[in-house]
Every structure is written in structure tokens, then in C-alpha cells.
Image (cartoon, rainbow, N blue to C red):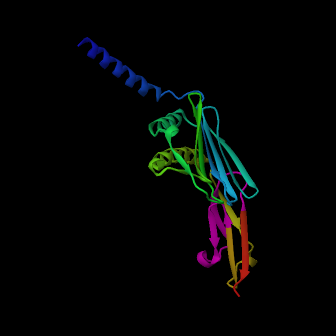
Amino acid sequence: MRSLMILSIMTISILTAGMASADNVPKDFRVKLYDGGGMVRQGATYFISKDSSFAEMWEGQARTKLYFKTSMDDLKRLYNIFLQYDFHRIETFEEMVYDRGGTTITATYGGETFSKADAGMTFIEESWQDEFNMVEGEIRKIVSKSLEPMLKQVIIKFDGSFMDEDKIVNFNIGDYAYMSARDGYNQSVIITLLPGEHYAYFTMMNKE
């Protein structure tokens, strides 16, 4: 009976200690998510840590780097998700492919660094895809929430001589796409952009 009681107490102590450690974010906790690769001429790096966080995005020659502060609540939730979904145990496999971009997540905590990629010739094992997606989704959620207050409305104006029914006009910047055949002939559009450099292109052709 005495041995049984001692075993029970030890079990409770271990479980409690494990739960408590998940709420104490290690000082070295930092996360980097990289999007890019292949033939795509755009990508992004998102970095999250206690001291400084940033989002760096590029398309063509346009590059933008924005810094933000990550709250302790967000850091705790993110760290707990890394633990909950056993990020360090996620399994991958290699397959010969060409010109494939994708996402790579690298995290440091507890004195160790772990990197998992779903990019290039590296794929996430099907049995671990949900875990990878949960971690990826939380990182993107934190970045999106942090960048949202920085968004600004911008007015793009076109010279009136461009806009007539004899021409087809297309304009792209960021995630915004304007097509005169779809949107009609407007001399200005209002779009929402982050501060910084943006890649844009404009095409105009006669309908003939």
C-alpha cells in the first residue's frame, strides 16, 4: 500500500509540472515562417519572438519590412500550440520535384532548434499534416492581427485617356486586380495596402 501511494503522488507531480511549463514561454522562444521558392517571384518571412517581431514581404524588386510587438498572450498560445501538436516530432519525406515553392517553419525553444518544411522536395507526412497546419495557421493569425492596424486606404487614379470602350485595361497591385472588362471603366479605384514598396503592373491594349 505504501508503494502504491508513493507512485500516485509522483504521477500527480509530473503531470502538474508539465502543465505549468507550457505557460512559461522560454526566453529563447522564437519562430520563423518562410514562404517562397520555386519560380514564384514573391514570398515572405515572418519572425516572432519576445523582443522583436517582423514581417518581410517581397515581389519582384519591391521589398517591405514591418516591425510589430507580439503580446505575451499570443506568445503563450503559440508556444502551447507547438507543444500540443508535437511540432518537433512532425515527420517529412522527400520526393523529386522541380520548381516547387512552399512553407518552412523554424522554431527555437528550450535550447533546441527544430525546422519542418513543406516546400521544394520536402513534404509533410499525411499523418502529420493537421499538426503542421495548426502551427502554421496560428503563426499567420498572429501576423495578420499585428499588421491589420497598419493598413492604409490608397486611391489609384488613371488618366482619362486610358479609359474608353476601345481599350482593355488591366491593373494589378498586391492582392488587388482591376479589369475593365469586368469592373467597367473607372478613372480611380480605392484599395487597401500596407506601408512600403509594392510591385504593380499595368496593361492596356486595343480590343482589336
Q: Residue furthest left?
A: 1
Residue 123 seen anywhere in this rendered image of the structure: yes
Pick the front one: 152 or 80: 80
Q: Please check the rendered image and state whether residue 174 is part of the magenta-colored stretch, yes or no.
A: yes
Q: Position of residue 84 (x, y in %)?
A: 44, 37
Q: Residue at x 70, y 53 (%)?
A: 58
Q: Position of residue 196 (x, y in %)?
A: 71, 51
The N terminus - image quarter: top left
Q: Is residue 142 above or below residue 165?
A: above
Give, as a single range, the part of the protein colored magenta. 172-199
Q: Position of residue 62 (x, y in %)?
A: 74, 55
Q: Residue at x 72, y 70 (%)?
A: 202
Q: Position of residue 133 (x, y in %)?
A: 49, 49
Q: Please check the rendered image and state whether residue 196 is part of the magenta-colored stretch, yes or no.
A: yes
Q: Residue furthest top?
A: 2
Pick the front one: 144 or 131: 131
Q: Is residue 73 left or right of residue 119?
A: left
Pick the front one: 58 or 130: 130
Q: Is residue 115 left or right of residue 18?
A: right
